[in-house]
Image (cartoon, grey):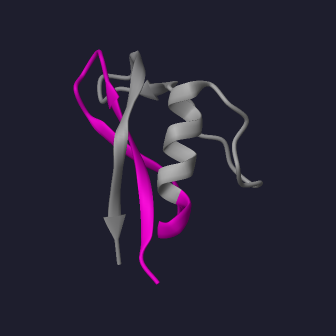
């Protein structure tokens, strides 16, 4: 069964992190819950609208949830 990876883009360096992962059917309700600020529908991980990222130059950036991709 394919899984999905939530994607966060760093405002500082532009890189995209792909994490956390979940089963494909969990993607839409989890994404919608994060956007609406509602409790997450599945236990085990939390998807937030903002996170932090360590940039290649060792600085820190703020990342925004931009969606998810499907992986095999």
What secondary structure is the magenta-colored segment mainly? strand
Q: In this view, does 40 lie to the left or right of 22?
A: right
Where, by quadrant of the figure, is residue 14 drawn? top left
Residue sitting at 40 percent across and 24 percent down?
63
Q: Where is residue 24 in the image (x, y as percent from the top left)?
A: 47, 68
Q: Position of residue 37 (x, y in %)?
A: 62, 25
Residue sitting at 42 percent across and 56 percent down?
5
Residue sitting at 69 percent across and 42 percent down?
40
Residues in magenta, as a range: 1-26
Q: Position of residue 9 (x, y in %)?
A: 31, 30
Nearer the observer, 23 or 18: 23
In the rendered image, the quadrant that contains the C terminus is: bottom left
Where, by quadrant of the figure, is residue 38 drawn? top right
Q: Is residue 58 above or below residue 2?
A: above
Q: In this view, does 48 lie to the left or right of 5?
A: right
Q: Where is residue 3 in the image (x, y as percent from the top left)?
A: 45, 70
List the single residue furthest toward the right.
43
> Is 29 colored magenta in this rendering?
no
List the single residue furthest toward the left.
14
Q: In this view, does 15 lie above or below 5?
A: above
Q: In this view, does 1 lie above or below 63?
A: below
């Amino acid at each position: 069964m394919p899984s999905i990876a939530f994607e966060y883009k760093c405002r500082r360096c532009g890189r995209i992190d792909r994490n956390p992962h979940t089963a494909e059917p969990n993607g839409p309700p989890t994404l919608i819950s994060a956007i609406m600020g509602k409790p997450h529908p599945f236990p085990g991980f939390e998807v937030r609208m903002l996170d932090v990222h360590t940039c290649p130059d060792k600085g820190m950036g703020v990342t925004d949830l931009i969606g998810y991709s499907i992986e095999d």
